[in-house]
Image: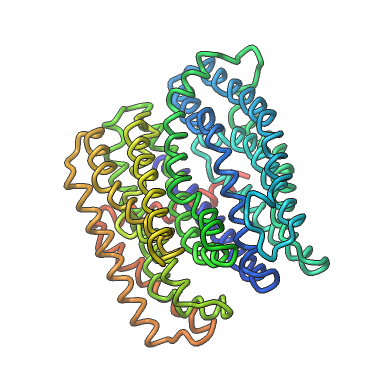
């Protein structure tokens, strides 16, 4: 296996480990916040992060395609061009932070009139928002420094940094909540502190990995701004659609249903969002090799790689979705005994529903970045999102569905858009048949049904009456699910390739230790 494949395998493995730690922290932290401060506290934490996504609409126009342009220029030997893109991004991020500072101050100062506070403490929530906004600005520079890891296909280094941050985040939060009076703003304060600490760490790693690309004010280029913006603007359109699709859900729930239902929806979204993050993390860790392959060989160089990525994504993502859907009621009965487990399960299913037929094909979005063809998908996404807001507002006004309308409408529209726009457009870009991608939709659905059946049988045998039984059932269901999906969806060559990919991270790490 090539060094690039070793790196990709290590990227994926380290990303999954990092995400596992992050999910564990989120799992225990959400439970603690709900038990200690009420479900509203958890809702405001997610709402603050949603406000950051609104601000990211502007930064995406410059930053979203930065890694792609730097990587493409570097691997084509255009070092001056790569340096120009990098320097331009540094200057733009500094300018954007200066612009956002007074806006963030205004939102924090007037927060009580913007959102319904319920029983939450206004100063506590204001501090939460203030630290989240500051963390957003600091993360702009962390992401920029981490572009070196993307360019060199060494994303596992970034994953290792994130893993250390997650472990430290859990330890510091545990100390604060154990020794001080609990406040919700501790979550964003600790996150900000760790982000600031990681800036010099990432800067040192960038200098070692990519010394050829350095910052210089002289390298700032108006042409680079135009190039980044002309492509990145479509990611801004896409993010605008994402904001309308899911980023406004908690705010709409707060306005139309109140702080309590907003908190309930935020709890129901916790585990689905963790699985969606798994899918997104896998996607981002497979992206660098696809970009490099396109830079060197065009569309012909990525088709075979993409086919394997689809099956790999389905293998990794479809199983936890199915296991969670099958066991969500007993899970919520144990995790959130004070809340309605059936209601939480229904909201969770509606939230994750779009990924059931799209577990494998979600990697198709990497094609748009690699080929720099973002317009069609972004316009379709934004159009569907506008429709989503209109339908949600209509349902909230004319029916008693409440938060069910908010959670379910976006998933239904996402499924339709993916089937009638995304899949056919990617097929056209790559010159392959649409039915090849639709077949993968059928495979994802079949895998979901199969693993749900496995989980149901496992639950009847092992039981779900306590955490020990439930964890044992989840573990057995996942292991059997991954094994059967591997056997059912990969041919003999594909199974060998998947197993090599799974073992490559270990061997790569071992070789590095031997060299040391």
Left of 199 or right of it: where is 5? Answer: left
Instruction: Say if residue 204 shows up in the picture.
Output: no
Viewer-side residue, 506 vs 72: 72
Q: Residue at x 66, y 74 (%)?
A: 35
Viewer-side residue, 173 vs 255: 255
Whether residue 205 is situated above or below residue 80 in the rendered picture: below
Q: Residue at x 69, y 52 (%)?
A: 112
Left of 446 or right of it: where is 145? Answer: right
Q: Residue at x 78, y 63 (%)?
A: 176
Instruction: Say if residue 298 shows up in the picture.
Output: yes
Viewer-side residue, 360 vs 415: 415
Name the quadrant containing residue 119.
Answer: bottom right
Whether residue 40 is situated above or below residue 98 in the rendered picture: below
Left of 197 or right of it: where is 64? Answer: left
Q: Residue at x 38, y 60 (%)?
A: 398
Q: Give how far across and how far down residue 413 sits, in percent.
A: 33, 51
Q: Give how far across and how far down residue 5 sits, in percent.
A: 41, 43
Q: Give how far across and how far down residue 160 sits, in percent.
A: 60, 49
Whether residue 374 is situated above or below residue 468 in the rendered picture: above
Name the quadrant containing residue 422.
Answer: top left
- Colour scheme in the image? rainbow
Quarter of the image containing the N terminus? top left
Left of 276 or right of it: where is 185? Answer: right
Quarter of the image containing the C terminus? top right
Viewer-side residue, 194 vs 6: 194
Total numbered circles: 0
Name the quadrant containing residue 104.
Answer: top right
Outermost residue toward the front in this view: 398
């Amino acid at each position: 296996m090539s060094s690039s494949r070793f790196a990709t395998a290590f990227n994926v493995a380290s990303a999954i480990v990092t995400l596992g730690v992050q999910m564990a922290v989120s799992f225990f932290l959400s439970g603690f916040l709900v038990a200690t401060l009420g479900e509203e506290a958890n809702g405001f934490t997610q709402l603050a992060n949603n406000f950051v996504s609104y601000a990211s609409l502007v930064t995406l126009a410059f930053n979203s395609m930065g890694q792609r342009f730097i990587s493409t220029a570097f691997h084509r030997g255009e070092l001056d061009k790569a340096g120009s893109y990098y320097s331009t991004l540094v200057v733009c991020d500094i300018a954007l932070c200066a612009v956002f500072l007074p806006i963030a101050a205004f939102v924090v100062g007037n927060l009580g009139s913007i959102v319904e506070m319920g029983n939450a403490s206004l100063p506590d929530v204001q501090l939460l928002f203030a630290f989240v906004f500051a963390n957003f600005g600091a993360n702009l520079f962390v992401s920029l420094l981490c572009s070196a890891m993307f360019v060199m296909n060494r994303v596992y280094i970034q994953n290792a940094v994130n893993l250390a941050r997650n472990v430290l985040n859990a330890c510091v939060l545990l100390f604060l909540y154990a020794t001080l009076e609990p406040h919700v703003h501790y979550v964003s304060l600790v996150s900000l502190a760790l982000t600031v600490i990681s800036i010099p760490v990432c800067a040192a790693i960038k200098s070692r990995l990519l010394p050829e690309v350095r910052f210089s004010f002289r390298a700032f280029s108006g042409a680079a701004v135009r190039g980044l913006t002309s492509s990145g603007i479509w990611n801004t359109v896409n993010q605008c659609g994402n904001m309308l699709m899911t980023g406004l859900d908690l705010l709409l729930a707060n306005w139309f249903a109140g702080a309590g239902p907003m908190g309930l929806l935020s709890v129901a979204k916790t585990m689905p969002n963790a699985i969606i993050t798994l899918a997104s993390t896998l996607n981002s860790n497979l992206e660098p090799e696809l970009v490099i392959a396109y830079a060197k060989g065009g569309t012909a160089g990525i088709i075979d790689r993409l086919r394997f990525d689809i099956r790999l994504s389905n293998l990794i993502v479809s199983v936890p979705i199915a296991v969670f859907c099958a066991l969500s009621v007993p899970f919520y009965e144990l995790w959130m005994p004070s809340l309605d487990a059936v209601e939480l399960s229904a909201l969770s299913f509606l939230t994750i529903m779009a990924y059931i037929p799209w577990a494998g094909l979600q990697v198709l979005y990497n094609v748009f970045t690699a080929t720099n063809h973002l317009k069609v998908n972004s316009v379709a996404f934004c159009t569907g999102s506008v429709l989503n807001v209109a339908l949600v507002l209509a349902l909230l006004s004319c029916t008693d569905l409440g938060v069910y309308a908010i959670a379910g409408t976006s998933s239904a529209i996402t499924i339709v858009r993916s089937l009638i726009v995304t899949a056919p457009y990617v097929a056209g870009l790559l010159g392959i048949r649409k039915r090849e991608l639709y077949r993968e939709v059928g495979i994802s659905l079949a895998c979901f049904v199969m693993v749900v059946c496995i989980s149901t049988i496992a639950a009847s045998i092992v039981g779900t009456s306590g955490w020990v039984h439930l964890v044992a059932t989840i573990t057995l269901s996942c292991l059997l699910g991954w094994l059967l999906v591997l056997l059912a969806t990969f041919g003999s060559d594909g199974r060998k390739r998947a197993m090599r990919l799974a073992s490559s991270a270990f061997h790569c790490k071992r070789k590095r230790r031997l060299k040391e």
